[in-house]
């Protein structure tokens, strides 16, 4: 029988608690490929070491006879680890510049072991067992199922008005046009959607119902890997053809969360917490997403050059100009200017600085979790951002570990965690590698980083991005990089004679000055949201199509509104009027009961009427200016 292969030997100061704790961690990392022993007199005698040398730094003796110490010994020892990620860290650490810095840090810690031990215990905890994430994964997948359930339920209430044959943006009409423009293979690649098979109104509704059922299955932990994969594909089918009504950042964030969930979800019909532990790559990809989500929002504000962020006055305008304000936002708008400036500075710090804690030790990550949770709570009470806040809170779970989460979720696994089978780990790595590359490049691109300046690197990334773009599962994030300082609002009116006009009331957007702002989230009223965007620019094709549906009296579109001022038959003409809105002050609110003040700016769209002549069923109506108005 062949003898065991020789192993390197690490000698350390056995009287140092700080050293013993790190040696215990390195034992777990190297998994028996390295021997660790407290340095004794015979070791010093055999190797010719001085007692002071051993007390000053750990010593590594390799099978070749090479002896190294300190930071170099640490990295050379980690190079023997069976974990690929650990070996990469070791190789980076042995680079000349990195090693020079590491030696200085090692010497500083060695001279201040007691202080370092206290800091180490606070940052990493006294336990040396590896952190587990099976409970984190279990809780995250339940919350992801809840997010998908909210998304499909909310969309199901609007899908026919937005995308049906008599909706604002008929999906069937768009796909019919693309069939004429693209070959079949390219159609599926560029627009991945199941609605190529059937884009009828019934299919659109069935898709939302199927999404609800799959979401419930994921909530109850039924075949989580299969159900979250199907949910990702089904929601992608809507987003791929949804255009502006399904282009919000929480829509693509849900797709990115769904894809990462499919990579890490346990297999089986009822897996419980799962036998296979999430890999280090799985955990890192989720934390990278958390970093990109917040850091992208923060750095985009700093790089935009917007004066309100530079002068710390952004929150003086934010609550008043938010797309769908809440009552909490109305009251927050009237807080003192000093508080608004401090809040603006805190927002920039939370979004641009705190994300770096995501990549830090355990306690530091927990601080980041609570900081982000506080930020999302404040946003939740002062604005209506659909299911975004719930997604962000769910993602924050990956900053914790099972030990932290078990304080509120006392669930125990049926057995110890096991590493993934090699074929499963290899397959996950192959699938996750492009996600990792694109995610890292998205961060580097914000700084015009030097690796992206090489033509070969740029060419490879362009090729990879072109293939990944239709999947919408690695995205840039950056909310409110430029703050809107005014609030234009569009009011839509209809008339029978061009003289007397009646207003169409919306369910959630700002309109009647006496109606208080409403808390709508997690429901996402997509037409109301897009009306806010429309008021910031010129009329777009979807808005003209919306007016056409009102002239037709489309019941599906009218159900998106709060009321129909023409219940018997549609009006002969419609128009859009632009107003400037400001929040009433506290004294005026007490005196008159109004929440808003408004001033008419002018016509946004002049009176329109249906053009004469037949129109094929399911097509957007043709309109013309009404000369009699």
Image (tube, helix red, strand yellow):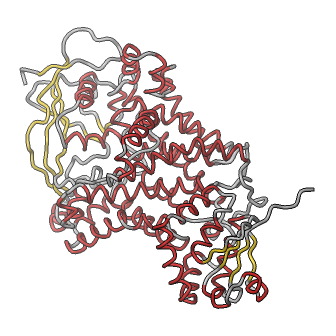
Please tell me how many numbered marks the rendered image carries. 0
483 relative to 463, above or below: below
Residue 32, above or below 567 = below
Q: Position of residue 242 (x, y in %)?
A: 39, 32
Residue 44 coordinates in the image, percent (x, y): 73, 85
Q: Is residue 97 visible?
A: yes
Question: Splitting the image into 4 quarters, where does residue 339 fall?
Answer: bottom left
User: Observer-nearest residue: 484 or 553?
Assistant: 484
Residue lying farthest to the right in this orientation: 1
* Spot occupied by residue 621 in the image (x, y as percentages of width and height): 26, 19
Residue beneath the point at 93% across and 56% down: 1
Q: Is residue 537 above or below residue 91?
A: above
Front residue (pair 485, 49): 49
Closer to the camera, 535 or 423? 423
Image quarter (top left, top right, bottom left or bottom right) of the C terminus: top left
Quarter of the view holding residue 61: bottom right
- Left or right of 591 on screen, residue 143: right
Q: Is residue 210 above or below residue 620?
A: below
Q: Is residue 457 left or right of residue 325?
A: right
Q: Position of residue 435 (x, y in %)?
A: 50, 45
* Corner quadrant of residue 611: top left
Asked if one can make out residue 394 in the rendered structure from this viewpoint, the answer is no
Q: Say which residue appears at 26% left-offset and 40% top-offset.
A: 531
Q: Look at 39% across and 37% down and name the residue there.
A: 459
Name the residue located 40 percent from the left edge and 49 percent from the top edge. Answer: 442
């Amino acid at each position: 029988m062949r003898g065991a292969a020789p192993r390197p030997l690490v000698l350390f100061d056995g009287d140092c608690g700080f050293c013993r704790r790190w040696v215990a961690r390195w034992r777990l990392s190297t998994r028996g490929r390295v021997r660790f022993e407290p340095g004794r007199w015979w070791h010093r005698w055999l190797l010719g070491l001085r007692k002071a040398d051993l007390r000053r730094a750990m010593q590594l003796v390799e099978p070749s006879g090479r002896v190294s110490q300190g930071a170099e010994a640490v990295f050379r020892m980690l190079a023997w680890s069976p974990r690929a990620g650990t070996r990469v860290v070791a190789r980076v650490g042995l680079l000349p510049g990195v090693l020079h810095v590491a030696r200085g840090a090692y010497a500083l810690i060695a001279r201040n072991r007691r202080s370092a031990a206290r800091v180490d215990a606070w940052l990493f905890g006294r336990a040396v067992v590896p952190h587990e994430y099976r409970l984190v994964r279990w809780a995250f997948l339940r919350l992801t199922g809840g997010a998908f359930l909210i998304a499909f339920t909310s969309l199901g209430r609007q899908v026919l008005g937005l995308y049906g044959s008599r909706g604002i943006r008929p999906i069937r009409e768009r796909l019919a046009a693309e069939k004429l423009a693209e070959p079949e293979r390219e159609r599926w690649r560029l627009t991945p959607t199941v609605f190529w098979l059937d884009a009828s109104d019934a299919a659109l509704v069935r898709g939302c119902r199927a999404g609800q059922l799959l979401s419930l299955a994921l909530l109850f932990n039924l075949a989580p890997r299969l159900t979250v994969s199907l949910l990702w594909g089904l929601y992608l089918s809507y987003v791929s053809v949804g255009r502006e009504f399904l282009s919000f950042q929480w829509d693509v964030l849900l797709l990115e969360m769904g894809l990462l969930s499919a990579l890490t979800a346990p297999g089986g019909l009822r897996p419980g917490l799962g036998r296979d532990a999430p890999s280090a790559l799985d955990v890192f990809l989720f934390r990278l997403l958390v970093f990109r989500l917040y850091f992208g929002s923060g750095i985009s504000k700093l790089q935009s050059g917007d004066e309100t962020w530079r002068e710390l006055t952004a929150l003086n305008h934010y609550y008043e100009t938010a797309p769908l304000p809440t009552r909490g936002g109305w009251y927050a708008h009237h807080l003192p200017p000093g508080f608004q400036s401090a809040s603006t500075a805190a927002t920039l710090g939370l979004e641009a600085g705190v994300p770096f804690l995501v990549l830090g030790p355990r306690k530091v990550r927990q601080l980041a979790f609570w900081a982000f949770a506080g930020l999302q709570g404040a946003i939740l009470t002062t604005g209506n951002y659909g299911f975004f806040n719930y997604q962000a809170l769910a993602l924050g779970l990956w900053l914790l570990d099972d030990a932290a989460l078990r304080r509120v979720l006392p669930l125990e696994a049926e057995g110890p965690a096991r590493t993934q089978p090699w074929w499963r780990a290899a397959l996950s790595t192959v699938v996750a590698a492009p996600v990792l590359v694109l995610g890292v490049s998205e961060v580097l691109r914000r700084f015009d980083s030097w690796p992206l300046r090489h033509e070969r690197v740029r060419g490879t990334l362009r090729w990879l991005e072109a293939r990944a773009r239709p999947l919408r599962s690695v995205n840039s994030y950056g909310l409110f990089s430029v703050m809107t300082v005014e609030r234009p609002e569009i009011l839509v009116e209809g008339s029978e004679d061009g003289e007397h006009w009646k207003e169409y009331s919306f369910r959630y957007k700002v309109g009647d000055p006496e109606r208080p702002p409403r808390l709508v989230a997690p429901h996402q009223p997509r037409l109301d949201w897009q009306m806010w965007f429309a008021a910031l620019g010129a009329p777009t094709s979807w808005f003209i199509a919306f007016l056409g549906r009102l002239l037709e009296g489309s019941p599906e579109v009218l159900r998106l509104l709060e009321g129909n001022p023409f219940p018997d038959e549609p009006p002969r003409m419609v128009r859009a009027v632009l107003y400037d809105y400001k929040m009433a002050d506290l004294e005026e609110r007490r005196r008159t009961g109004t929440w808003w003040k408004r001033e008419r700016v002018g016509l946004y769209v002049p009176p329109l009427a249906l053009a004469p002549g037949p129109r094929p069923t399911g097509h957007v109506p043709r309109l013309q200016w009404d000369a009699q108005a």
